[in-house]
Protein backbone atom coordinates (compact mmCIF):
# COMPACT_ATOMS: atom_id res chain seq x y z
CA UNK A 1 0.00 0.00 0.00
CA UNK A 2 1.37 3.39 -0.92
CA UNK A 3 2.02 5.81 1.91
CA UNK A 4 -0.52 8.58 2.34
CA UNK A 5 2.04 11.11 3.49
CA UNK A 6 5.49 12.51 2.80
CA UNK A 7 6.30 13.04 6.47
CA UNK A 8 9.23 10.66 6.15
CA UNK A 9 10.79 12.35 3.13
CA UNK A 10 14.20 12.18 4.89
CA UNK A 11 13.95 8.37 4.97
CA UNK A 12 14.46 5.95 2.08
CA UNK A 13 11.23 4.05 1.35
CA UNK A 14 11.80 0.30 0.88
CA UNK A 15 8.12 -0.42 0.19
CA UNK A 16 5.79 -3.02 1.65
CA UNK A 17 7.06 -4.38 4.98
CA UNK A 18 5.55 -7.88 4.53
CA UNK A 19 8.29 -9.31 2.25
CA UNK A 20 11.00 -7.98 4.58
CA UNK A 21 9.28 -9.54 7.57
CA UNK A 22 8.97 -12.88 5.76
CA UNK A 23 12.70 -12.78 4.96
CA UNK A 24 13.59 -11.80 8.54
CA UNK A 25 11.56 -13.97 10.96
CA UNK A 26 13.86 -12.82 13.80
CA UNK A 27 11.90 -9.55 13.76
CA UNK A 28 8.76 -11.34 14.96
CA UNK A 29 10.17 -12.03 18.41
CA UNK A 30 11.33 -8.43 18.83
CA UNK A 31 8.12 -6.54 18.11
CA UNK A 32 5.59 -6.83 20.95
CA UNK A 33 2.75 -6.02 18.58
CA UNK A 34 3.29 -9.32 16.76
CA UNK A 35 3.71 -11.56 19.82
CA UNK A 36 0.97 -14.10 20.20
CA UNK A 37 -0.46 -13.54 16.73
CA UNK A 38 -0.48 -16.36 14.19
CA UNK A 39 1.83 -15.85 11.17
CA UNK A 40 -1.08 -15.23 8.79
CA UNK A 41 -2.34 -12.35 10.99
CA UNK A 42 1.14 -10.86 11.21
CA UNK A 43 1.42 -11.04 7.43
CA UNK A 44 -1.88 -9.18 7.00
CA UNK A 45 -0.79 -6.41 9.39
CA UNK A 46 2.63 -6.19 7.73
CA UNK A 47 0.97 -5.49 4.35
CA UNK A 48 -0.43 -2.30 5.89
CA UNK A 49 3.08 -1.20 6.89
CA UNK A 50 5.99 0.30 4.97
CA UNK A 51 9.71 -0.19 5.52
CA UNK A 52 12.19 2.68 5.64
CA UNK A 53 15.89 3.13 6.18
CA UNK A 54 17.68 6.16 7.57
CA UNK A 55 21.30 7.08 8.03
CA UNK A 56 22.85 8.20 11.29
CA UNK A 57 21.91 11.79 12.31
CA UNK A 58 18.66 11.74 10.32
CA UNK A 59 15.65 13.31 12.02
CA UNK A 60 12.73 10.87 11.69
CA UNK A 61 10.27 13.51 12.91
CA UNK A 62 10.37 16.67 14.99
CA UNK A 63 8.53 17.74 18.08
CA UNK A 64 5.49 19.67 16.84
CA UNK A 65 5.11 17.77 13.54
CA UNK A 66 1.64 16.32 13.09
CA UNK A 67 1.79 12.64 13.98
CA UNK A 68 0.85 10.32 11.14
CA UNK A 69 2.51 7.00 11.95
CA UNK A 70 3.81 4.64 14.59
CA UNK A 71 7.24 3.16 13.89
CA UNK A 72 9.08 -0.01 14.89
CA UNK A 73 12.86 -0.16 14.95
CA UNK A 74 13.90 -3.18 12.89
CA UNK A 75 17.60 -2.31 13.12
CA UNK A 76 19.44 0.63 14.65
CA UNK A 77 18.94 3.11 17.45
CA UNK A 78 16.94 6.32 17.98
CA UNK A 79 17.33 9.20 20.44
CA UNK A 80 13.95 10.54 21.59
CA UNK A 81 14.12 14.01 23.11
CA UNK A 82 12.23 17.23 23.74
CA UNK A 83 13.67 20.65 23.05
CA UNK A 84 17.30 20.97 21.97
CA UNK A 85 19.18 17.72 21.26
CA UNK A 86 22.05 18.73 23.57
CA UNK A 87 20.34 20.74 26.31
CA UNK A 88 16.83 19.29 26.01
CA UNK A 89 15.28 16.41 27.90
CA UNK A 90 16.14 12.92 26.72
CA UNK A 91 13.03 10.79 26.91
CA UNK A 92 14.75 7.64 25.80
CA UNK A 93 17.26 5.83 23.67
CA UNK A 94 15.40 3.15 21.73
CA UNK A 95 16.91 0.19 19.95
CA UNK A 96 15.88 -2.84 17.94
CA UNK A 97 12.31 -4.00 18.51
CA UNK A 98 11.14 -0.81 20.23
CA UNK A 99 8.31 1.39 18.99
CA UNK A 100 7.80 5.12 18.95
CA UNK A 101 5.10 7.49 17.75
CA UNK A 102 2.28 5.25 19.02
CA UNK A 103 0.03 8.18 19.88
CA UNK A 104 -0.29 8.94 16.15
CA UNK A 105 -2.54 5.88 15.74
CA UNK A 106 -4.92 7.29 18.34
CA UNK A 107 -4.90 10.97 17.40
CA UNK A 108 -3.48 13.22 14.68
CA UNK A 109 -1.87 15.68 17.07
CA UNK A 110 1.55 17.32 17.10
CA UNK A 111 4.44 15.05 18.03
CA UNK A 112 5.52 15.39 21.65
CA UNK A 113 9.21 14.71 20.90
CA UNK A 114 11.90 14.66 18.24
CA UNK A 115 13.41 11.35 17.10
CA UNK A 116 17.00 11.33 15.84
CA UNK A 117 18.67 8.28 14.28
CA UNK A 118 21.84 7.43 16.27
CA UNK A 119 22.97 4.53 14.07
CA UNK A 120 21.94 3.62 10.52
CA UNK A 121 18.47 2.19 11.01
CA UNK A 122 15.56 0.37 9.42
CA UNK A 123 11.98 1.07 10.48
CA UNK A 124 8.53 -0.31 9.79
CA UNK A 125 5.78 2.32 9.85
CA UNK A 126 2.06 1.93 10.31
CA UNK A 127 0.35 5.15 9.26
CA UNK A 128 -2.88 6.45 10.71
CA UNK A 129 -4.48 6.09 7.26
CA UNK A 130 -3.36 2.47 6.87
CA UNK A 131 -4.47 1.72 10.43
CA UNK A 132 -7.92 3.02 9.45
CA UNK A 133 -7.83 0.71 6.41
CA UNK A 134 -6.82 -2.20 8.62
CA UNK A 135 -9.71 -1.33 10.94
CA UNK A 136 -12.19 -1.36 8.05
CA UNK A 137 -10.87 -4.55 6.45
CA UNK A 138 -9.74 -6.57 9.50
CA UNK A 139 -11.39 -5.19 12.65
CA UNK A 140 -10.19 -8.09 14.83
CA UNK A 141 -6.56 -7.36 13.92
CA UNK A 142 -7.01 -3.63 14.39
CA UNK A 143 -8.32 -4.32 17.91
CA UNK A 144 -5.24 -6.46 18.61
CA UNK A 145 -2.99 -3.61 17.43
CA UNK A 146 -4.89 -1.03 19.46
CA UNK A 147 -4.76 -3.19 22.59
CA UNK A 148 -0.99 -3.45 22.29
CA UNK A 149 -0.66 0.29 21.67
CA UNK A 150 -2.76 0.89 24.80
CA UNK A 151 -0.46 -1.44 26.77
CA UNK A 152 2.63 0.41 25.51
CA UNK A 153 1.21 3.82 26.38
CA UNK A 154 0.01 2.60 29.78
CA UNK A 155 3.44 1.16 30.52
CA UNK A 156 5.13 4.45 29.58
CA UNK A 157 2.73 6.41 31.77
CA UNK A 158 3.37 4.05 34.68
CA UNK A 159 7.15 4.48 34.30
CA UNK A 160 6.78 8.26 34.04
CA UNK A 161 4.75 8.29 37.26
CA UNK A 162 7.34 6.13 39.03
CA UNK A 163 10.10 8.44 37.80
CA UNK A 164 8.17 11.49 38.98
CA UNK A 165 7.74 9.98 42.43
CA UNK A 166 11.37 8.89 42.56
CA UNK A 167 14.79 10.35 42.93
CA UNK A 168 14.95 13.13 40.34
CA UNK A 169 12.04 15.11 41.71
CA UNK A 170 13.23 14.47 45.28
CA UNK A 171 16.69 15.70 44.29
CA UNK A 172 15.36 18.80 42.55
CA UNK A 173 12.81 19.43 45.31
CA UNK A 174 10.01 19.80 42.74
CA UNK A 175 7.32 17.76 44.50
Image (cartoon, helix red, strand yellow):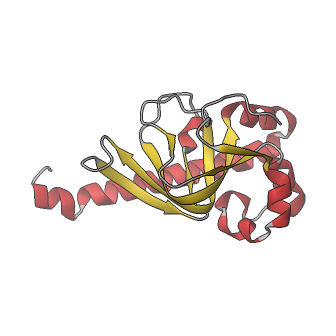
Q: Is residue 86 above or below residue 127?
A: below
Relative side of 4 to 73, left or right: right
Q: Is residue 89 above or below residue 171?
A: above
Q: Is residue 1 above or below residue 174?
A: above
Q: Nearer the viewer, residue 70 or 5?
A: 5
Quarter of the image with the N terminus in it: top right
Residue 108 placement: quadrant: top right
Q: Give the percent coordinates (x, y) of residue 53.
A: 65, 51
Figure disc tally: 0
* Farthest right residue in view: 40
For image coordinates 43% across by 51% down, the residue present is 80
Q: Nearer the viewer, residue 89 or 168?
A: 89
For image coordinates 65% across by 62% down, the residue present is 32
Q: Give the percent coordinates (x, y) of residue 144.
A: 73, 50
Q: Nearer the viewer, residue 42 or 162?
A: 42
* Farthest left residue in view: 173
Q: Give the percent coordinates (x, y) of residue 120.
A: 57, 59
For image coordinates 11% across by 55% down, the residue present is 172
Relative side of 73 to 51, left or right: left
Q: Give the percent coordinates (x, y) of residue 130.
A: 75, 35
Amino acid sequence: MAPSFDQFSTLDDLGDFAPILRARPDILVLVKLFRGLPPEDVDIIAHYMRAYVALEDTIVFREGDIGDAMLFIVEGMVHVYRGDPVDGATLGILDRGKTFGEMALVENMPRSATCLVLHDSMFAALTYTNFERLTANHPRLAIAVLKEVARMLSNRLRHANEFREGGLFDFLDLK
